[in-house]
Image (cartoon, helix red, strand yellow):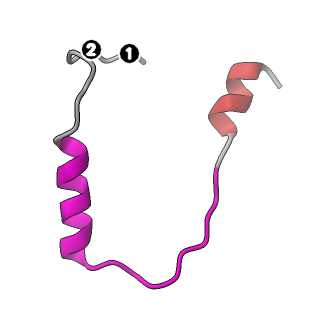
Amino acid sequence: METFEMIKSRKAVRQYTGQITDEQLNNILLAANAGAVGLGKFED
């Protein structure tokens, strides 16, 4: 497996107890969208 493929396939799995509400999820997504984006540059 090539290094890049190995990096892309890596996953961190954690176990969480309980659930969040739709409102909490919405607040998390709003915060993520408000974060800095590195001068607006997007690299693939």
The residue under the point 25% across, 26% down is 37
Q: Residue at x 54, y 75 (%)?
A: 16
- As for residue 30 lying within the magenta part, the answer is yes
Q: Residue at x 83, y 26 (%)?
A: 1
Question: Which residues are the magenta region?
Answer: 12-33
The quarter holding residue 8 reads top right
Q: Position of residue 7 (x, y in %)?
A: 67, 30
Q: Which residue is mark 2?
A: 41
Callout 1, which amino acid? Glu
Which element carries disc 2, helix, strand or loop?
Answer: loop
Disc 1 to disc 2, how far (Cα)? 7 Å
Quadrant holding the C terminus: top left
Q: Residues within 10 Å of mark 2 (few under 14, many from 20)?
A: few
Q: Which residue is mark 1?
A: 43
**Furthest-bottom residue in view?**
18
- Confirm or deny contact between disc 1 and disc 2 (CB under 8 A): yes
User: How many numbered badges does the structure rendering display?
Assistant: 2
**Vertical placement of residue 13 versus 1, above or below:** below
